Every structure is written in C-alpha cells, then in structure tokens.
Amino acid sequence: MQEPQDAAPHPDTPAGSSPEVAEPLAAPLTPALPVEPVPKFCARCGVKWDPAWQTCPSCLPPSTVDSIAGGIRVHQATRRIEPDADPNAPGLAASLWLYFLFLATSLFAMFAYAGELTVRQVLAIQALDTLIVLAFAVVFFTVLIGPLRRLSLGYTALAALIGIPSMAFAWVFVSALHNLVGFESAYETQGYFDAGYGWAVVMISFVIQPAVVEEVMFRGLILPGLQRFMKTRDAVIVSSALFSVIHLTVAIPQFLMGLVAGWLRVKSGSLWPCIVFHAVHNGLVVGVEGWLM
C-alpha cells in the first residue's frame, strides 16, 4: 500500500520552508448613515407624500415642473427650490378682492347704522361674510384640500392650550384700554340674550362662524396668496396685520393672535390647529362673559 505523497512545493518557495497561507482581507467598516423618516404628508400643503418624491410637486411653481410621468408631476431641476409658494393659491388681486369685500360689509354696517346694529343685522352680515368666503373657497378649493385633510393632532392640541393665554391677554388688554379711555365695558353676548336668543346662536355667532370663516379666509386663502409674492415670514406678518384691521377694537391682541395662527398653519400644514385656536380663544371669551353676567 503506497503512502500518499506530499504535494509538490511551489517553485518560488525556498527549500525547507512551508508555504504561506494568505489571510482573507477584512471588509472595510463603513459607518451606517442615519435614515431620515419618510413623511406621510407634505409639511406645507398637506398632500399625501409619495416616497419617490424629493420635493412636493404640488408646492412647486409651474416653471420648475419639467415633465409629467404617470399623471404625477416630476421635478427634474437640479437646483434646490424653496417650496414656499402654492401655484394654485389666489393671486394678489384675488386676495385683495376677498379681503376688501369682507371688510366692506363691516364698514357699511358701521356707517349705515352708526355702529348700532340689532342682533338680526349682525347675523345677516355674518351670513353675507360666510357666502363671500365660501365663493372664494369654491374657486380655490385645490388650495384648501390638503390643509383640511390633514388633522395634525399634535399641533391641534397645542393650539387649544395656546388659546387660554391668548384669551387672557386679550381680556386684560381690552379691560385696561376701557379703563384708560373711560369706556364702560359692555358684554357683547348680553344683547343676544336680551333679544331672546339662546346659547346655541351665541356659540354659532361668536365661536363657530368666526373660527371657521376667518381662518379659511386668512390662513387658508390670503396667507398662501401672499406667499406667492413674499417670504413666508413676511406673509404671516402681513396677513396678521390685515386680520387685526377687521378687529379695530382689539387690534393689538388680534395681531398677535394672527401671528400665532399663521405660525400654526405654516408649521402644521393644516388649517385645523388655526380653527381650534380661534375657537378656544373666542369660546373662553363667551364663557367668561356668561360667568360675569
């Protein structure tokens, strides 16, 4: 029986030495890159986010959209675009028309009736204001779809909490102003009860109608319209100033209120935090008046 022969040494291996075995090369260690979470909605317009998107196509001006693939607008530009403007938002002329039509109803009532309005007349003006805003909302409904679809529960809860100090500041400011100029404080809700209206009409007139109609108008239509012509920060400031003008008796608190509502709209991408903030603010005013009466 033959013994197995050793394998022949490699010709380059010196006599009497064992061949070297090459060690396997270790794979270089690369640090894992942090994976950014994919958003569910566009933070600005509230449209449902497609994971394939790098920029929300709904927020881009038409000039930056180069092609349409499968019904979805695809942005192919290499430079970064700041998605501050909604191309579907009202233009400057439409925004001004909406604002001054809304303002005209209050000015007409002020001069025609010398500020002495019956509750029925106030309700009629509110109905007219609602129709004006509703007409513009129908024309520019694509601007409102995203912000109304997105709930943003976190910012909505925050908005409800902010409504408490907002109301407290407005109450102290108005009371101090009345004492300074010698006006006697009058509870606006008292006239409703004296005219035979109940709490349901009071809540609709003082809480629900202003919160929904004014927020749809200012934060849903006018603010995006201004964003087409100026930076977001400037648009929030200008829309807040316009908001304060229609509340002349409490202009400063309402200007601050507009800033908060504009911030909530921009940060959340939703209109619901603005509506809840406005409703809580007004609801607390009604509640305090009812308690003091």
Image (cartoon, helix red, strand yellow):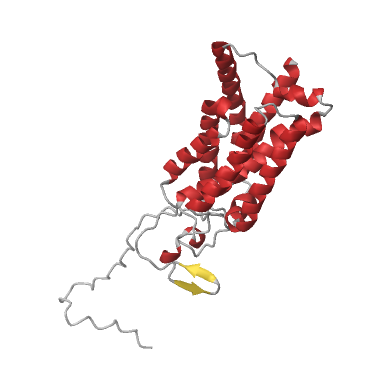
Question: How far from the left and from the top, in percent, is residue 87?
Answer: 49, 59
Q: Which residue is drawn at 75% across and 22% down?
A: 190
User: In the figure, 236 relative to 249: above or below?
Assistant: below
User: In the figure, 173 relative to 14: above or below?
Assistant: above
User: Which of 52/217 is in front?
Assistant: 217
- Tell me how many marks there are: 0
Residue lying furthest bottom:
1
Residue 82, quarter of picture: bottom left
Question: How far from the left and from the top, in percent, is residue 246?
Answer: 57, 34
Q: Which residue is drawn at 74% across and 18% down?
A: 291
Quarter of the figure with the N terminus: bottom left
Residue 186 visible to the viewer: yes
Residue 153 visible to the viewer: no
Q: Residue at x 58, y 19 (%)?
A: 174
User: Which of 270/247 is in front?
Assistant: 247
Residue lying furthest front:
112
User: Which of 78/27 is in front?
Assistant: 78
Question: How far from the left and from the top, in percent, is residue 282?
Answer: 66, 30
User: In the figure, 14 relative to 272: above or below?
Assistant: below
Quarter of the figure with the C terminus: top right
Question: How far from the left and from the top, in percent, is residue 265?
Answer: 54, 43
